Image (cartoon, coloured by chain):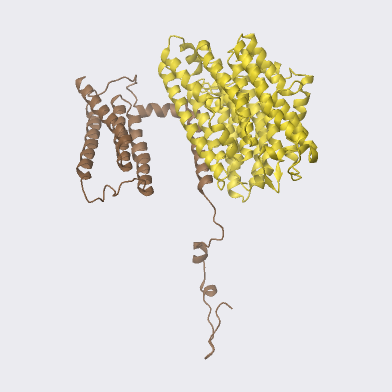
Amino acid sequence: MITHAIFFYFFSIIAIFSALMVITSRSTINSVFFLILDFISVGCLFIMIGAEFLGMILLIVYVGAVAVLFLFVVMMLNVSDQKQSWFMGKKSTHIPAGLLFSVLIFLELLVVVGGWKYKDNLMSSSTLNLNSEYSNTHEIGNVMYTEYFLYFQISGIILLLSMIGAILLTYSKRENLKRQSYIDQISREKLTAVELKEVPFEKGVKVDD
Amino acid sequence: MNNISALYPEVFLSLGIMSVLMIGVFIKNSYNLVNKLCLSILFITIAIIFNSLDNSEKVFLGSFSKDKFSDFIKILILVSSIFVLSTTQNFINNIKISKFEYPILILLSILGMFFMVSANDLILFYLGLELQSLALYILASINRSDLRSTESGIKYFVLSALSSGLLLYGCSLLYGFTGSTNYEIIQTQLSDNNIGALFATVFIIVGLAFKVSAVPFHMWTPDVYEGSPTSVTNFFAVVPKIAGIAVIIRFMDVPFKMILSEWQLIVIFLSIASMILGAVAAIGQTNIKRLLAYSSIGHIGYILAGISTGEINGYSSSIIYLTIYVIMNLGAFSCLYFMRVNSSYTETIDDLSGLSRNNPFLAFAFLIIFFSLAGIPPLGGFFAKFYVFIAVIESELYFLAIVGLITTVISAFYYLKIIKLIYFDDNKREFDQVKDLNSSTVMIISCIFLATLFLYPSIFNNIIISIFNI
């Protein structure tokens, strides 16, 4: 129980600290990195209460996709008011801090995955009433396409709608644009492409006449 | 086993949307074709709903409820959307935003509203709400080249996302304190002692009040109404309001039924504030779309007054008010499509002055519709207010009734000011002669309905009272 409490406070303190840093840190890029740290810590908390599917989804979706997307957007927009970007600056004061947090994240993952894989009751606070025969993922899969099928489908329609909206609001068809046509290029034959002409002496020929 | 037949209207609507989307993608310049196809989809959906009017059941673990109430609201949504879609076709073509996605987005938001009004579960309700509002954000900013349209879309998106956040916060609190997302189980778990859940209901009411633009959550309405293209404003002013009011009634009637004394005061406050602001703030407006925005805020106040009684009589009077409100607004907006000067649409009220001299027919339509919006006796708007006030007085909320009557008088001022402008002022501008069969048909239908309702004013009452046997 004590190990459980220690790990719980470890993860929650990191989560709260990094959440605070997201909104107080001056550099937007640092904010995004703290957001990633926050997601990872919360994911670990989810795994601790036995919701390993939710924790992993948080890692894959939020850290893997959303936060990285944020990072790209922030780097591309050049929104930060700082004079130099942190990874190319003259002073390399960021490297120790960066290393520290990478080690922290690695440690978190090591502890939580190790504890979850090799010692079942190391950290589990067992607040969830689970049928031990199935895993979480199995349970979710059971109801996702049966009882919650309607929600699943509506979520799909919402995604479709957001796609339509994104295309409608950003895509503009440019008229009078000459595009390459690979089909035309490949299907050209020697007969149509090359024309042999008799060149009269001292007169030349007009091309494209 | 789930009986999918309760979902036939929704299934048909979504399949229709997918196929029409494909048609729109592969046929070039297909706005007019897609618009007609969407109209026919809506007609067929009405037929499907009529086909199974009598059975009511709950499917998918009781999360989707098909009953008379939802059927009635769905038919109201469909009929008003048919009117909106058919009147807007000319307008869309004229201001050159004829993109085939426009009717498809409207259909998608209708699909979301269907799930909202049928929802018997917080998750389904929220998914429906998201589907509906996401389509509305896109619709608001559909005129990309117009700065005001883009601005209104962004404004609507940011504020609406905030209110969705509040709503979701309330939903999760409610789930935490009652242990279920199902409306009926929440009803049994909610009591005056469950403080946490009561706290959650406040958030939900705030979120819902935002969606129907009740004061003090109305700030987005005038800007969005003014900025969006008139056709989109027409849709905004009518259809999402139906769904929003229906959802509020369902929330009050099912999950919050046992805690009437807790939410009644909040709804009374929303109602009084909306009525007062709708009446006072509209006076200084010069843009007719802004004026209609404030007028719709006022009307939402009267509808909420009916809801605040917490009784079936009050709910049904609200639904009657809503139905008549929809008809009045459809008429009012179809009049706006005739306000064209030098082939561009105008929105300022001053342009209406002296309209009766060169366009007596349009002037008369404005007369009937604005008199009706003001609630002048023989017209339809009077009966709407009449039923609401009767319900309010029957449940002894005298203060609410008095405020309602006073604000009716105040709001009559600005409606009458426009009538005066049309009939007694000098002619300033001459409108183009517009031939628009669809808009004039809707205008005529609306005027005839409002003018002849006094012959049989209880036409809706029996139907609407029967739908409340949930």
Find residue B172 and report its horizontal and vertical position in percent.
42, 22
Name the residue nearer the viewer: A103 or B286: B286
Find residue B354 and report its horizontal and vertical position in percent.
76, 38
Quick check: B132 left or right of A32?
right
Find residue B46 and report its horizontal and vertical position in percent.
67, 29
Name the residue nearer the viewer: A142 or A53: A53
Residue drawn at x 54%, y 28% as measured from the top left:
B218
Quick check: A108 left or right of B468?
left
Q: Which chain is brown?
A: A
Q: Residue furthest front?
A: B426
Find residue B181 and report its horizontal and vertical position in percent.
46, 20
Quick check: A31 left or right of A194?
left
Q: Where, by quadrant of the figure, is residue A36 drawn?
A: top left
Q: Residue furthest bottom?
A: A201
Residue A90 lies, with reference to residue B320, above or below; the image says: below
Residue A183 lies, with reference to residue A30, above or below; the image says: below
| The colour assigned to chain B within the rendered structure | yellow
Q: Quadrant of the C terminus of chain B?
A: top right
On the question of residue B67 being in view, the answer is no
Residue drawn at x 51%, y 62% as measured from the top left:
A181
